[in-house]
């Protein structure tokens, strides 16, 4: 259930979308949206205390929510895991596709070094939202590696999409399929390592340290892990900077 502030913030973000292509994610866009809705500018600014970056992050969270709503009604149970992930990434991009310039502006804003922590939380939040939506129940270090890997794939996909002029963005969907195939190769390599005598020896020795790593709610994240419940996520529909891990690129947008 939305609070009154949350509902007004969402209305303001929607109204800003016609102004962002000209004013960017800025106080000017916030003021223009407030005037359009007949909202006191001071009240609107209170909802976005840091101005454009908070508006951009609200836009990003909106994209995550729209994606989750679509996935909740999709036949994910009949799909392979890799197909679920590809479908979810596509759904996330399509959720903001009508506002590609707003995504581009958000990506550029969140790529600034000063906004790197916000961008990282945003991107991590999107990866977490996707994994939760497709039914991930990891409780160990895999909780982190899955999200870090997906964050890299998602951010690359958004950057590719922003430059894609193919009909129906078919090249972006093909790009996503290729990147997921790369991830599956890594997973097959990990499985082979676990089956290898040297791999088994490692897991019985130094690798046992990984057993202490638990997902949030199953023992808590290790010190320094991104906290998807923290302020800011899912960027202004800008899937921003990457958390530590396989290294998604900053300012991925969408």
Image (cartoon, helix red, strand yellow):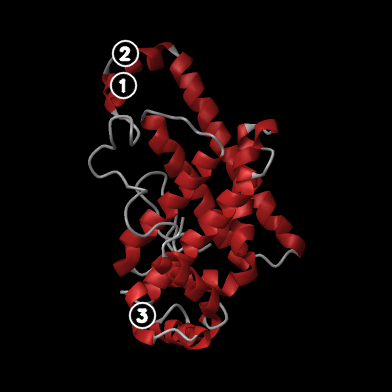
Image disc number at residue 161: none
**Where is residue 100 shown, x and y percent of the image?**
60, 70
Marks 1 and 2 sit apart, C-alpha to C-alpha, by 6 Å
Residue 107 appears in view? no
Tell me the distance, in whole angstroms, between the alpha carbons under discs 2 and 3: 58 Å
Q: Residues within 10 Å of mark 1 (few under 14, many from 20)?
A: few
Q: Which residue is drawn at 47% across and 42% down?
A: 149
Q: Do the residues labelled 2 and 3 touch (CB within 8 Å)?
A: no
Q: Residues within 10 Å of mark 3 (few under 14, many from 20)?
A: few
**Upstream in sequence: badge 1 or badge 3:** 3
Q: Position of residue 26 (x, y in %)?
A: 41, 81
Tell me the element at label 3. Answer: helix
Q: Quadrant of residue 54?
A: bottom left
Numbered disc 1: secondary structure:
helix
Q: Residue sitting at 66 percent across and 56 percent down?
A: 172
For mark 3, what is the residue? 43
Q: Is residue 94 left or right of residue 205?
A: right
Residue at the spot of label 1: 207
Camera-near label (1 vs 3) is 3
Query: Which dot marks residue 204?
Result: 2
Q: How many labels does the image show?
A: 3
Q: Earlier in the sequence, mark 2 or mark 3?
A: 3
Against 9, residue 144 (above or below) is above
Image spot of residue 123 (x, y percent): 43, 54
Q: Nearer the viewer, residue 250 or 133?
A: 133
The crowding category of the residue bearing disc 2, from other C-alpha atoms within 10 Å (few below 14, some 14 to 19, many at least 20), is: few
> Do the residues bearing badges 1 and 2 touch, measured as CB atoms within 8 Å?
yes
Marks 1 and 3 in Cβ contact (< 8 Å): no
Q: Which of marks 2 and 3 is in front?
A: 3
**Real-space Cα separation, disc 1 to disc 3, in angstroms:** 53 Å
């Amino acid at each position: 259930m939305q609070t009154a502030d949350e509902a007004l913030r969402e209305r303001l973000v929607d109204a800003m979308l016609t102004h962002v292509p000209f004013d960017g994610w800025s106080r000017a866009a916030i003021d223009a949206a407030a005037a359009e809705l007949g909202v006191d500018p001071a009240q609107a600014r209170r909802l976005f205390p840091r101005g454009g970056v908070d508006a951009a992050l609200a836009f990003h969270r909106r994209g995550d929510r729209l994606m989750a709503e679509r996935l909740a009604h999709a036949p994910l149970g009949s799909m392979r895991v890799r197909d679920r992930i590809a479908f979810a990434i596509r759904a996330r991009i399509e959720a903001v596709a009508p506002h590609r310039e707003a995504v581009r502006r958000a990506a550029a804003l969140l790529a600034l070094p000063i906004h790197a922590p916000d961008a990282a939380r945003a991107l991590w939040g999107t990866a977490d939202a996707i994994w939760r939506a497709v039914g991930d129940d990891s409780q160990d270090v895999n909780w982190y590696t899955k999200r870090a890997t997906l964050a890299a794939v998602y951010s690359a996909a958004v950057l590719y999409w922003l430059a894609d002029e193919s009909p129906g963005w078919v090249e972006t969907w093909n790009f996503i399929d290729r990147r997921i195939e790369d991830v599956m190769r890594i997973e097959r390599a990990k499985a082979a390592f676990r089956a290898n005598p040297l791999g088994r020896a490692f897991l019985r020795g130094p690798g046992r340290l990984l057993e202490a790593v638990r997902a949030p709610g199953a023992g808590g994240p290790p010190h320094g892990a991104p906290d998807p419940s923290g302020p800011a996520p899912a960027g202004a529909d800008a899937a921003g900077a990457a958390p530590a891990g396989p290294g998604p690129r900053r300012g991925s947008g969408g």
